[in-house]
Image (spheres, rainbow, N blue to C red):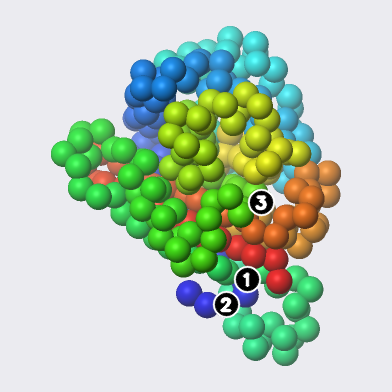
Amino acid sequence: MAGLLGGGGGVSPEGLVGSYTMPAMFAHIGMEHSKRYGTTFAQFAQVSVKNHHHSTLNPKSMYRVETPLEEVMGAEMIAWPLTKLMCSVNVDGSAAAVLMSEKKVRERGLMDRAVRIRASEMSSNPFEDRQMAMPDFSGATRVAAANAYEQAGIGPEEVNLVELHDCFATAELVHYENLGLCAFGDAGKLIDDGTTALGGRVPVNVSGGLLSKGHPLGATGIANIYEVSTHLRGKAGERQVEGARIGLTHVVGGGPGMGTACAIHVLEKV
């Protein structure tokens, strides 16, 4: 996919099979991660603390309030280890992107706003028997990430910021690993040491994410691209990721018996 300004999107899993099933699925994903790597309840909860803090810096966010760790952990339990404040906020919203060739961008004098698409990838999960009963949102992300990095000619260590599909706090931690931001089993360390917070090595969901900015379902994919593009243009205000040159966006969708799909875009400052 060539061009300077582009969009990508994904259908939210909540929009496909009903929000009542999703907390259990992503709780299960978190419990698997905890059993395998020792990830704690507090580490999952810290994702919400981080994203709610980021949201206070975003005037387009639905909820611009701090949620201290004790408040997140003490909120109504939805499906262990997910409390109410660790679940995304379904909101109304819209987003749009303009896709143009470099020639047209130059003709219209828009190079100062241009964002180059280094990679555009959509992948589905490799077949697994478990997909018929319990979707695994990791497989599709791993495939899409590997293909996107190859398309872009970069490695994950070159990414300066990420907007990923944090439909639940457990999802964000698991996707750190799926996107290659750290080794498998190290996601908890990234949230503990501030690597993915604003000012860290690779800030994630500086918009506030789906957990606090809001999750407008079908608009979420383009909204992620808008956020990263805003940083690459240096126009993100208080939440600006300084020196951002390469950003990555990620969305997933799927449901029981349906398999899953993932869309990833790698964007570059011109």
Q: Position of residue 233 (x, y in %)?
A: 76, 62
Tell me what residue is drawn at x 26 percent, y 46 percent: 259
For disc 3, the marked residue is 160
Residue 104 pos. (x, y %)? 66, 87
Residue at 68%, 30% in the rendered image:
194
Q: Quadrant of residue 266?
A: bottom right
- Inter-mark Cα distance, 3 to 2: 21 Å
Q: Amino acid at mark 2?
A: Gly
Disc 1 crowd, CA 10 A, few/some/many (<14, 14-19, 20+): many
- The Cα–Cα distance between marks 1 and 2, rounded to whole angstroms, is 6 Å
- Which residue position is annotated with label 1? 116
The amino acid type of the residue labelled 3 equals Asn
Q: Which residue is mark 2?
A: 3
Secondary element under disc 2, as helix, strand or loop, is loop
Per the model, the C-alpha gap separating discs 3 and 1 is 15 Å
Amino acid on which disc 1 is placed: Arg
Graded by Cα atoms within 10 Å as few (under 14), some (14 to 19) or many (20 or more), the crowding at tag 3 reads many
State which quadrant residue 202 falls in. top right
Would residue 23 be visible to someone looking at this image?
no
Image marks 1 and 2: residues in contact by CB distance under 8 Å: yes
Q: Is residue 86 left or right of residue 141?
A: right
